[in-house]
Amino acid sequence: MWCSGGRVTSTAANTPPHPVASGPCRTYDSLVEPTDNPAAPAPERYELPITVLPDDIDDLGHVNNVVYLRWIQDVAIAHWGAAATPEQQAEVAWVALRHEIDYKLPTLLGDGVVARTWVGTAETHRFERNTEIVRVRDQKVLARGRTVWCPINRATGRLTRVSEAVRQRFSVPAAPDATAG
């Protein structure tokens, strides 16, 4: 998937394009998320506007939990497509190892929604990514997610070590171990 002209477009089979609100996908440097490492630079946030569709609504009248997971994946993939070079995208694909989602407030049909994502720390084959789903009109956080992604070599389909450029672009330094010493 990639962000193109205000839409998230999918190349995966059985994954229809999901329309997003008008306007381009944007990257924000000014939105700062506290980290465990005060010496680390604040991670850049990437923002994707989303339109809530009638099919997103469950029988309780709000967005179904599975839809939040789709939005979290959509914004992560859009960020990779916007920030990685074509060469990096041709070499590396990402597979989710773990998703955690905290649902804060219901999202309703007609709500303007923005998915915001930023990278976290990384290990050799585990890259953390954080996401917030925010209602535009009042900036209330509707859901928060944390995903652990694993890099895969597109040619072999196997785990891969990413280049230093990818590691620097898609992770932040871990906090120093306070117990070490």
Image (spheres, rainbow, N blue to C red):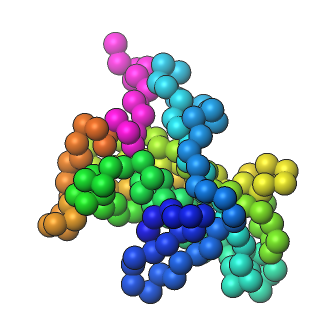
Residue 101 image position (x, y, % from top left)? 59, 59
User: Dividing the picture into quarters, in which one does residue 52 lie?
Assistant: bottom right
Residue at 73 percent of width and 61 percent of height: 113
Q: Which residue is drawn at 69% across and 65% down?
A: 21
Q: Where is residue 78 in the image (x, y as percent from the top left)?
A: 48, 59
Query: Is residue 25 left or right of 37 when viewed as pictured?
Result: right
Total numbered labels placed on residues in the image: 0
The magenta stretch is: 168-181
Quarter holding the N terminus is bottom left
**Residue farthest to the right?**
138
Verify whether residue 169 appears in magenta.
yes
Above/below status of 121 relative to 73: above
Give residue 109's quadrant in the image: bottom right
Name, please, the residue furthest toward the left: 156
Vertical arrangement, residue 155 with respect to residue 55, above or below: above
Q: Quadrant of the C terminus?
A: top left
Note whether residue 150 is visible: yes
Q: Does the magenta stretch include residue 133?
A: no
The answer to whether 73 appears left or right of 134 in the picture is left
The residue that appears at 44% across and 26% down in the rendered structure is 175
Main secondary-structure element of the magenta-colored stretch: loop
Judge by depth and name the residue closer to the eye, 180 or 87. 87
Give the quarter of the image for residue 154. Answer: bottom left
The answer to whether any part of residue 33 appears in the image is: no
Instruction: State the residue at coordinates (51%, 35%).
Output: 43
On the image, the x and y values in percent for residue 20 come to 64, 68
Give the residue furthest to the top.
Answer: 181
**Viewer-closest of 74 and 148:** 74
Q: In this view, does 163 lie to the left or right of 145?
A: left
What is the x, y in percent for residue 124?
26, 44
